[in-house]
Amino acid sequence: MTSLSPNLPPDKQREMLRQMLTIRRFEERASDDYRAGKIYGVVHCYIGEEAVAVGVCTALDPRDRIISTHRGHGHCIAKGADLNRMMAELYGRQTGYCKGKGGSMHIADFGIGMLGANGIVAGGIAIVTGAGLAAQMEGKGGVAVSFFGDGASNAGPFHECLNIAATWKLPMLYVCENNMYAAQTAAAATHALGDVAGRAAGYGIPGVVVDGNDAFAVYQAANTAVARARAGDGPTLIECKTYRWRGHTERAGQPDPRERAEVEAWQRKDPITLLERQLREQGELDDAGLRAMEGEIIGALEAAVAFAEASPFPLPEQATNDVFAA
Amino acid sequence: MRELTYNEAAVEAIAEEMRRDPKIFYMSTDALPPLLKEFGPTRIRATPITEAALTGMGIGAAGSGFRPIVDWRQVTFSFVAMDQIVNQAAKIHYMFGGQVTFPILFRASVGGGGKVAAQHSQSPYSMFMNVAGLKMFLPSTPYDMKGLIKTAIRDNNPVISFESGRLMARKGQVPEEDYTIPLGLADVKRQGSDVTVVALAWLVHEAMAAAETLAAEGISVEVVDPRTLVPLDTATIRESVRKTGRLVIADEAGPTAGFSAEIAALATEDAATFARLKAPVKRVCALQVPIPYSPVLEDAVFPDRGRIVAGVREVLQGRGHAAAA
């Protein structure tokens, strides 16, 4: 089952596909370069969940603010982050978004309202709720979006923030990306409700379950929630049922308890394939158009990698910069 | 000059800054009545009892152009917000490459003496000093309180105002006119030549009383109040120790990995200061225990003027020897 085509112009719909493909190709490249030793530490891939970030961010304006998780590349790209500076950050270079201080888990671009990927599960929820409070006090109709996983929905800040956002009618979207696993532990083993969205009732706000692999369905749910938030009616909890194709991280040899058949079943529900089909059925995309889009994305990624590789590493003495602001 | 209490000085500083800058707002689990009356519930926000959420929201609002004040009230309540303090507030500016500033004032009362037992009595500033990315101060007088709070509100970083519960009602002179005190500047509260006593907050007053007692015996004590913990005014402390050659550190916290240890280290690791030391450094600290309830037990735990006097006498033992050498 697929959603109805949203009330979006064709170029916006194609832009959604372009962003989703960009996320996937970016992460495929990041994964390869991680394995090749060019990217350090840890990389968490969003592949399979692209429809959530893109569906939600399509409903946002530049004035709106979002916060992400340890699995943050998709949200950065969907909010409009620069691929060169993202890749340079993964490569640990001076030209990266964080001057090489953050890496994959901490990419932020406050200039576009991307308040950062955050390495602590549930760590960003309160921060972005503060951005929602700021938006309310600014009074210019801005909204704030918290992306988090099913694992974070069991942590205190989720509950504290839903309560305060509901009480103060903050212009917030709480978007749970339920990929069914908190690292390696199945959601069924960590909370008793089948739907995270059911928790909204406890805070007196709408809780919506949506097919998180259907970008149009996500967009429509987000659009409704954004309208509600901009009107001053308060927050919405949107639970997007989705799945991560890859392991919790790209590190080799990590346990992955998931059945192969389960992974493959979700891969057959590929959000990118679904959106492609929807666009083709509406006559908004053909083979040539898709090839051209893929070509542009690969070109942009090659350029991003070249930019990163050509960029200098930070100087050792820069380790002491930016502990405090001037 | 007029007098204000320590607490009134803090509130006056906040009110003056809020009049000056509309981006400042205040969150605490109960609204402070005088501030609420003047600024209303949008800027003086009474919140649910959710310190973690408040702290995180302060960070998000600061990163969105506001200058929030987050009042944890008692420092022990801040511990439920530790992820937001340590992983988020302290690191976010650095971790994101310094791309935006996070001007936040956190407030927390510290210390003991209230007979309220372990979960409402603690002086854990060294825990916070250990985290890179947080500035913090602990004033001993209403004058210092007002000047430091005003500076902290104008600072573009997370700054913690630790405030001594014992001193809240203590009065002191505060001028009517606007003034600020820079962070990272110690104050020599009493000049002396035989022994340096470094103390904070309530123990500054105990050290002053100890100095009076000892002056009657011809012992000249210099009392140095660092005021700011991060950044710490290392130069003033070392200069005093180089002058007197003896160092006693008084702290309402226990000694282990504490503020007192930091002061001892900064004196002894500096060759020029170490060379002038005539006696081992003496720490006069609380016992390393959770703070107990019963007055008999609580009084046994904390240092006071009597223990500072004893500490000074200890470092003066063999003074004649040292002088002769």
Image: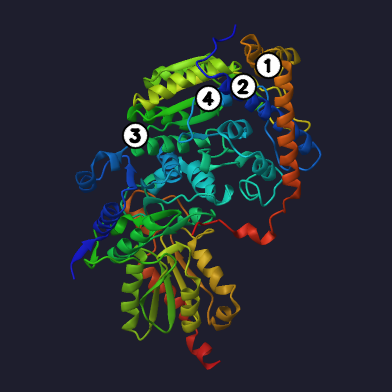
Amino acid type, residue under disc 4 in the picture:
Val
Chain hosting mark 3: B
Q: Is residue A54 left or right of residue A140?
A: right
Please tell me the numbered disc located at residue A217.
none
Mark positioned earlier in the residue sequence (4 or 2): 2
Label disc, if present, on residue A14 of the rendered structure: 2
Number of the front mark, 3 or 2: 2
From the top left corner, tell me how far across and down residue A298 is, in percent.
74, 32
Identity, as a three-letter code, of the amino acid under mark 2: Arg
Determine if residue B253 is in view. Answer: no
Which quadrant is the N terminus of chain B positioned in?
A: bottom left
Task: Return the chain for callout 4.
Answer: A
* Residue A246, position as x, y percentages in the image: 71, 25
**Is disc 2 on the same chain as disc 3?**
no
Q: Report the residue at 61% width, 10% height from top.
A: A282
CA–CA distance in space, label 3 to label 4: 29 Å
SS class of the residue under badge 2?
A: helix
